[in-house]
Amino acid sequence: MDGNRKWVPGFKAVLLILLSHTAVALEVPLDLPQPPTITLQSPKDYIFDPRENIVIHCEAKGKPQPSFSWTRNGSHFDVEKDSKVLMKPGSGTLVIDISQEKAEAYEGTYQCTAHNEHGTAVSNNIVIRQSRSPLWSKERNEAIVVQMGVSLVLQCRPPAGLPPPVIFWMDNNFQRLPLDKRVSQALNGDLYFSNVLPEDTRSDYICYARFPHTQTIQQKQPISVTVLDSSPEGERRPGFMLPLGTTSTQMVLRGETLELECIADGLPTPDISWQKDGGELPSSRTSFHNFKKTLKISDVNEADGGAYRCTATNNLGTVHHIIKVTVNAAPFWVSAPRNLILAPNETGILTCRVSGEPKPQISWFVNGVPIENAPEDHSRKVDDDTVILSSVQSGSSAVYQCNASNAFGYLMANAFVSVLAEPPRVLTPPNRVYQVITNSPALLHCASFGSPIPTITWFKDSQISIKNGDPYVIHEDGTLEIHVAQPLNSGKYTCIATNNLGIKENHVFLEVKEPTRILKQPEYKVVQRGLSAVFECKVKHDPSLVPTMTWLKDKGELPDDERFEVDTDSLIIKDVTDEDEGTYTCIMNTTLDQDSASAMLTVVEATPTPAIVYEKPDPPADLELTDQTERTVQLTWTPGDEHNSPTQKFLIQYEDLLHEPGVWINLTEVAGTSTTAQLNLSPYVYYSFRVRALNNVGYSEPSQPSRQYRTNPAAPDENPSDVHGVGLEPGNLVISWTPLTGFQSNGPGLEYKVQWRQKDVEENWSSKNVANVSQFVVSGTPTYVPYEIKVQALNDYGSGPDPEVVIGYSGEDLPLSAPDSVRVMVHSSTLAEVHWEPVAFPSVRGKLQGYKVYYRRERGLQETEKETKQEEQVLSFSGNRSEGRLPGLQPYSVYSLFVKVLNSKGEGPPSPSKTFETPEGVPEQPSFLNVVNHGMDSLTLEWGPPTNNNGRLAGYTLKYQPVNYTSELGPVKVMTFLANETTTTLGNLNASMLYKFYLSARTIKGPGPDITQEASTAMDTTRTQPTVETGKVPPVGPAFGTVNTSVSEDGAVISWEYFGHHKNVYVEYIVENSKEDWKKETVNGSHSHMIKGLKPGMSYRVRVVAKDAADPTVHSTDEVLVTVPAVPSRQVDIATQGWFIGLMCAIALLILVLLIVCFIKRNKGGKYPVKEKEDAHQDPEIQPMKEDDGTFGEYSDTEDHKPLKGSRTPSNGTVRRDESDDSLVDYGEGGDGQFNEDGSFIGQYSGKKEKDTHEGNESSEAPSPVNAMNSFV
């Protein structure tokens, strides 16, 4: 700041204190009152395509929702009066339909204003221009004839388009002309030849201009060039063709791209180089183009100003040109003003710091009005780029605009000052979990709002107060930063927001995770072609994080080849080829971090070495048996050839020629260095042995068998296995076992000695010897008693070892007794608990499996007649239980039950039946809910009682609420009904509104589940636009919004939207074409009114008027034409009307009298032409019924069912000029239907919409967002 500036005493100190109000931009929650904020606007320079709609964006937020208005070229732009302009509902965005208009009529400078009761925000000035692609001026190009070696320029000079066209040169075949350092195209599109050659001769040098917005291409007339070599030009020093002279100047704006160009002639063709006098070219922003003839520096700043030297050189000399560059700057922000939230009596500051070259001029506005013209505010002080607001008061909220401009542009920013008194609130979601890696920074957020601005304090684990300083930093926005997070920093953190109006706290959690690290990195590999390469990559990571391993080759994906196999911690490349050489990188990713490591693979030629043949060994030979005993023998052999692979082991096999001839069984293995084996043998076996050798290739073929060796018989060495005793029938015991094999028998005459005795009852064993069987049945046993069982093997040479004792049980029988003392405890209307005395164990007569409870619903307590019994239900309870629960019972019912005991054989007798009652419960939902008789303001509901009342039905509860077109639910209304009521009619409903109904039945236990239904009321509507009486000054924003009308038997209903402040609002009406005075009915404080007493069949002009004694302005809607139908528009079943029945009876009686008279006359010989008279004098009132609809022709009501002239289906509130409403039918591919606001189809209630003549020119296509974005380019 200027040190010589005069300040009021203490101002600098105040300024320092107030900086806290500008350091952090606070967002005001949208549920709090606040001035408007522009959230979206079109760019300052908007070039539109005349083939598409113009879309000028202007969106804003605020509380209340802002209203919008526009200016064009500095004057108010009345959007409502232009039928081609639509303002989108809820925003200020304009959509201009220029499909049949001159687009030039909408060019100009537009500005949007967003206003609510707290202030006014304005957009930038948006310059709207039409893209243009003018035709090339007609010209005749003279043929050019030059000598070889001279320089040449072919001028393009395209028409000036908007935006400028892209230039390129092509021939007649649409092939681009080749460019090089000799032939090049300048930035202005001209084609330069440093020297011409004979091959440059052609007649089709054509310059093309492509206009980006319209995507059109135009061409210049072809230019013919002939190069002669009769008197060629000799070699010469370079000279500049562009720019001319030795120096030139150029200006560029800060932030743009500087383009400098030098094109030289000469022979040979010169080379171009660039340098900056007194400085270096910024390498990161510098690029060369057009064979170094063009120098570009992007994102220019003030340091890029200065002298740039381009040098042209060939072997005959050098020439220089200096371009002096000046950098100017449109205004740019140093510190833009930000929204300011102040509490009453607080002081704040707005700053608007800008820079530019030349220095910008700063202007302040309040609510869009220059601050010097705004109402005087003694709490406000303006000093150049600063506004001081002292001791602000409630109600002084406003939007300030700062405008900074110089010769090259302007900046404009809105910043509101909102005066609020609001206790703190924390905006960061509660209990958020932050995860970081050890040694990395952690940011814990505590976004808050309050006025005065809350003070933020932090606590760890709800106890430790955190202060600024290592390792913590508390930022101005409340964020807590831990520079280097460690595991000990994990835990619960609490931030507390405090101001003088209250306190609010919020909890967040920090988890500090272990870093991901590669412990074993892949290593450099040199692999012979055709072999495999293995890269290892072992990783350690935090166990709570899920890792993902990725392998790359040369920073790209691995080849899609089956030879590459990725494992959890390795990469295997099989059959390596030369293409596999490169750098391989393993990357381990988690959600928080990653680690990577790389290694190279080099593929080399395989070293030629003599091939080594590896084969299976030859079979051993010379088998010999020695050292023979009863149970052992020694086997020796001679190994065969190993074939370059050492023998690892020998396998000895045997064949039992007595019991299993032809089957070779593995006996034992010995090391590959041994040639003998001591073999353990079994008795009573005819052995024959053979040997097989094993190396890395595989097993050898078997050796030749040894001679046969027989062992002597002996008593069995083992007894049968898997001995069991199970009774299959009452009174028996089946003893079973797995018999021995012939090899295990050890001798001839194998038998089994079966022994049994009743456990703890009998002392002596009963026994029986059996052979060639695997079970034995003991009969005459008591029911289900334990037995001790033994089975021993024996043969002709003795018995086996003493067998083990096994416990088995004899057969079971059905239980004898039923459970006793059955009791029922009812816990709720659907749950009961059953208790019983367990059955004595002896009477179970088997293994107790559990108990079964059989129960059945006998009847309902409320029912007078006994129901058909329901199917019996069963619940099983395993084990020795004495109680069980019965869920899923039906409330308010009588149940019976009995209990049975269960063993493996079956069920015992039932217990005595026990009856119990369940209490009342909540009923089921009503059986149906239908909506009938859809009226304009009423609906009739019918419903049926629940299928199961589950008690004494006390009545019904009906809840209903409206649903708007965005599926938002309105307030709930509740009605109750008696049990005998099953229908009701709801009146005073909103027309054309969807309602949702919830109906539940109730008992003394409460309401049951709801049955829901949705239905809409019907309405015929007419919509109109608000207008202001001629000659009156319009208010800020319209006084009236949408106006709807509907007609019923009782009269006409008028509804409207009203935004004015006037106290006196009337509905006025008059008969159409009448000269009487308007009739007036006061409707203050309401937004709808019914006009009663209108005459059927008459048409009335209706309008809504607002005026106030303090304000001479009269606001009125357009007049709406309302026609009252002469006949009610509902269908009546004429056949049920009393007058009709009487008429038919009278006609029948008349016909009977005529027949009697005719009969009498005929008997007298006379004639009476009844038929002729009936044909001649047919009663016009007696008409046949129509076959198509079943109604009498005279009373057809088809005309009354047509929509009123000019009537409309209610929309979502979008009102377009000239009452042109685009419906979904307009945009669809046909169909007569229309849609309600909730999307429900109502085509069956309305005829096909026919557009008015004035609607025919409207676009039937919504503006394309793609086209809209292209128009900003």
Image (cartoon, helix red, strand yellow):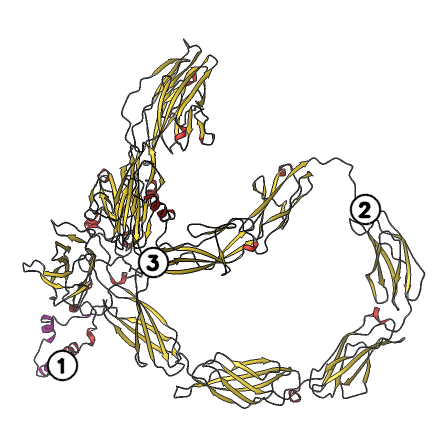
Identify residue for label 2: 645
Assign a secondary structure to mark 3: strand
* Label ID, residue 149: none
Q: Which residue is mark 3?
A: 422
Quarter the C terminus occupies = top left
At label 2, the amino acid type is Ser
As drawn, the label of residue 1149 is 1
Does residue 80 sit above or below 789 in this rendering? Answer: above
User: Considering only vertical position in the picture, is 397 above or below 763?
Assistant: above
Badge 3: residue crowd in 10 Å (few <14, some 14–19, many ≥20): some
At 42% from the left and 17% from the top, the residue drawn is: 320
Q: Earlier in the sequence, mark 2 or mark 1?
A: 2
Of the pair 334 and 127, the residue shown nearer to us: 334
Quadrant containing the N terminus is top left
Classed neighbour count for the residue bearing mark 2: other residues with Cα under 10 Å, few (<14), some (14–19), many (≥20):
some
- Along the polypeptide, which appears first: circle 3 or circle 2? 3
Q: Which residues fall within the magenta stretch?
A: 1156-1185
Asked whether the beta carbons under mark 2 and mark 1 sit within 8 Å of each other, the answer is no
Please tell me whether mark 1 or mark 3 is closer to you in this view.
3
Rendering coords of residue 794 (x, y %): 85, 76
Task: Report, in whole angstroms, how far the alpha carbon at label 2 lies from the one at label 1.
Answer: 127 Å
Nearer the N terminus, badge 1 or badge 3? 3
Q: Nearer the viewer, residue 2 or 1151?
A: 2
Q: Position of residue 1076 (x, y in %)?
A: 5, 60
The residue positioned 23% from the left and 63% from the top of the image is 1019
Amino acid type at circle 1 is Leu
- Please name which of the two marks, 3 or 2, marks the residue nearer to the observer: 3
CB under 8 Å between discs 1 and 3? no
